[in-house]
Image: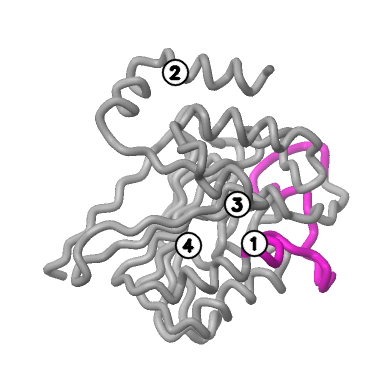
Amino acid sequence: AAIQAAYDQLATQPGFARLRREVPILATWDDHDYGWNDSDRSYAKKEESRKIMLDFFGEPQDSPRRSRDGIYESWLFGPPEQRVQIILLDLRWNRTPWDRRAVPQQRGDGFPGSYAPTLDPAATILGENQWSWLEEQLQVPARLRLIGTSLQALSTGSQWEGWAMMPRERQRLFDTIRASGAGGVLFVSGDTHWAELARVQPVDSGVRYPLYELTTSGLNQGWEFTQILNPHRIGLPYWKPNWGLIEIDWEQ
């Protein structure tokens, strides 16, 4: 009921209502759309959350997003020479719990987060079905691939939620891209309450080209109390409410 009420409130916001009328929206979720804060596969009402979200965004009743183990999906846009693939992952439905660690009660500059990296081979972010699906999607011809991952994929400086908290899964993501031969991968992420651009070089990922990630979050709140490290960050982070825009210049 609380999640339904939140969507109802969002629908009344004039700016969002106009956005929904005038442009296509491809949506995935993170923890608060899915369940409780930092929630994982154990959340008991994920089926209810899925129905509410997909109904809100007008997903067809016969969509595979309504029946598979998560709301992950992909789309293609443009002619072959300018084809863009958008892949939206689901980092909640199948994810095993994070390993927690002791943290200071006082949050200040450099406060790193609540979790510790785990090397447990059974730990997973996507689950095996979604991993197999992603491998198939990366075989689809496209010049540019925008992979929407609700949690940061490249950052290794934070101990908040992120792929770095499951290093085996993070490396599997890189290995999957490398093995597929897929070019033009660009990550888009959120969750963090700040915005930044990051890059991981081939020597660190095993992928034949640099991987970039645009993080933009959040639209209505920022975290100005802390300075989270990210060794892969390009330039400075932006700590106030923000949104991101990607423009594709095919001449370049």
Disc 1 element: helix
Check disc 2 and give the amino acid type: Ala
Residue 123: say if magenta: yes
Between residue 18 and residue 78, name the one nearer to us.
Answer: 78
Evaluate if marks 2 and 4 touch, with contact meaning CB atoms under 8 Å apart.
no
Between residue 252 and residue 233, name the one nearer to us.
Answer: 252
Residue 159 spot, x, y in % from top left? 71, 55
Check disc 1 and give the amino acid type: Trp
Say whether disc 1 or disc 3 marks the residue closer to the N-terminus: 3
Evaluate if marks 1 and 2 touch, with contact meaning CB atoms under 8 Å apart.
no
Q: Quadrant of the C terminus?
A: bottom left
**79 shown above or below 114:** below
What residue is drawn where x is 30% and y is 62%? 84
Evaluate if marks 3 and 2 touch, with contact meaning CB atoms under 8 Å apart.
no
Residue of label 4: 233
Q: Nearer the viewer, mark 4 or mark 1?
A: 1
Disc 3 element: loop
Question: Can you tell which mark lies on residue 11?
Answer: 2
**155 shown above or below 143:** above
Q: Give the quarter of the image for residue 244.
A: top left
Question: Can you tell which mark lies on residue 25?
Answer: none
Few, some or many residues within 10 Å of mark 4 (<14, 14–19, 20+):
many
Spatial distance from mark 1 to mark 3, Cα to Cα? 13 Å
Spatial distance from mark 4 to mark 3, Cα to Cα? 24 Å
Between residue 177 and residue 208, name the one nearer to us.
Answer: 177
Between residue 162 and residue 224, name the one nearer to us.
Answer: 162
Residue of label 1: 163
Q: Is residue 112 visible?
A: no
Residue 130 spot, x, y in % from top left? 62, 62
Q: Which residues are magenta?
A: 104-130
Check disc 3 and give the amino acid type: Asp
